[in-house]
Amino acid sequence: MLTLIHNAYLYAPEDLGVCDVLVSGSTVHAVAPKIEVTLRGAGVERVDAAGRWLVPGFVDSLVHITGGGGEGGFRTRTPELRLEEAVRGGVTTLVGALGTDAVTRSLGELFAKAKALTEEGVSCFLHTGSYAVPPVTLTGSVRTDVLFVDPIIGVGELAIADHRGSQPTVSEMARIAIDARVAGMLAGKGGVVSLHVGPGHAPLNRVYDVVETTEVPITQFYPTHMTRTEEHFQAALEFVRRGGTVDFTTSTTPEILTDGEIKCSRALARAHEAGVACERITFSSDAHGSLPVFDAQGRLQGLDIGRIDSLFGEVRDAILEEGLAPPVSLATITSNPAAILGLWNKGRIAEGLDADLNLIDPQTLEICDVMARGRWLMRDRALTVASAFAEVGR
Ligand code: ZN
């Protein structure tokens, strides 16, 4: 089956202007200003995409696909992500992770959910471990998990600067990083250590202790939630200047922003103005993590849930409100996360890579059509797939 997308304005994410893209099976076969396919008959689907942007399917590097939260008691455990939410958000590649709770939730459950989402049409990977040290694993060690279990591409989110973390020592962090690194090298995977960075002060100092006193390179660590305070944001800029990659969390609430968190799109604009390497900044949604709402006395008032459509929402705001160029903005959810995660066939539109594509209305920046591995999951804003049991509880 061939699909020929005509006359789209292509952000690959770099600006390639008006192009044709030919999809064959699950991959992009050709990208060129003009592509002619002489084959006749039912084997070629032709899509007129004039007046649309064509961008890579989005890569969300942190999603609590089996749910997260639970810090307010059992009833505050958040539900699983549904396929439909990812597709409406234009997300075609996800990385699932556990979080605080690796007791009532398990890696086995995470593995099964990742497999389910991949069977349903998107590409889902996962990290072994959780907030805690020593990391929980499927096969007995981080090294064998990354080496032998296909969808496992790294470890995390390991918590630092957080009262819910295990307060890992330098040698514990170095050991985990090297296990992930060596297994990643042997298996041809990223082997990155995703770090949940909590609200503590001097949040990345423990990472520098590891990098400065051992042979672990700074590129092995991938800290997230780096806009939660001005101090975190400044630490993120410094981390990028030292050669690392940082992640900003897009899901938030008005209360959290009032409390001092920096909106992702604003943070990207400030990083751009500061002249740091924006190709080492990524956004992730942290979707289905819990967003606690506290009153003035710090009492829990309610819990919100992180939404996956916040991922492109912040890119939209970066373009429309902050005036950033589409390639810089789009790269934070396409080529940049694909690079740090080692997902070399994701995050860009180019010959031979997976056909994960979104068509976007350039005026409103609404997602109109979504293709994942060569298959349409949304056409003209209407889903063309449904997860199993999608009607239950509706
Ligand atoms: Zn986290």
Image: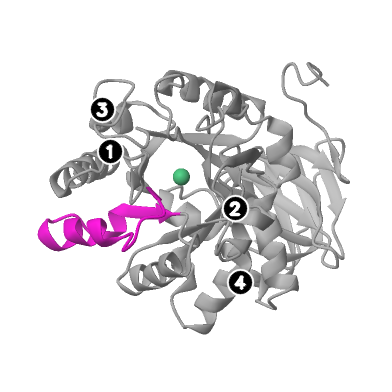
Check residue 383 for magenta coloring. Answer: no
Residue 390: percent from the left, percent from the top? Answer: 77, 21
Crowding around mark 3 (Cα neighbors within 10 Å: few <14, some 14 to 19, many 20+) is some
Measured in 3D between alpha carbons, the distance from the residue under mark 3 to the one under mark 2, in whole angstroms, is 47 Å
Image quadrant where one finds the N terminus? top right
Crowding around mark 1 (Cα neighbors within 10 Å: few <14, some 14 to 19, many 20+) is some
The tag on residue 26 is none
- Dot 3 corresponds to which residue? 144
Q: Amino acid at mark 4?
A: Arg
Residue visible at 62% across and 67% down in the picture: 265
Mark nearer the viewer, 2 or 1: 2
From which residue to which does the magenta span run? 196-224
Find numbered disc 3 in the image and state the secondary structure of the residue it sits on.
helix
Q: Amino acid at mark 1?
A: Ser
> Does residue 56 appear in this view?
no
Measured in 3D between alpha carbons, the distance from the residue under mark 1 to the one under mark 4, in whole angstroms, is 32 Å
Q: Amino acid at mark 2?
A: Ala
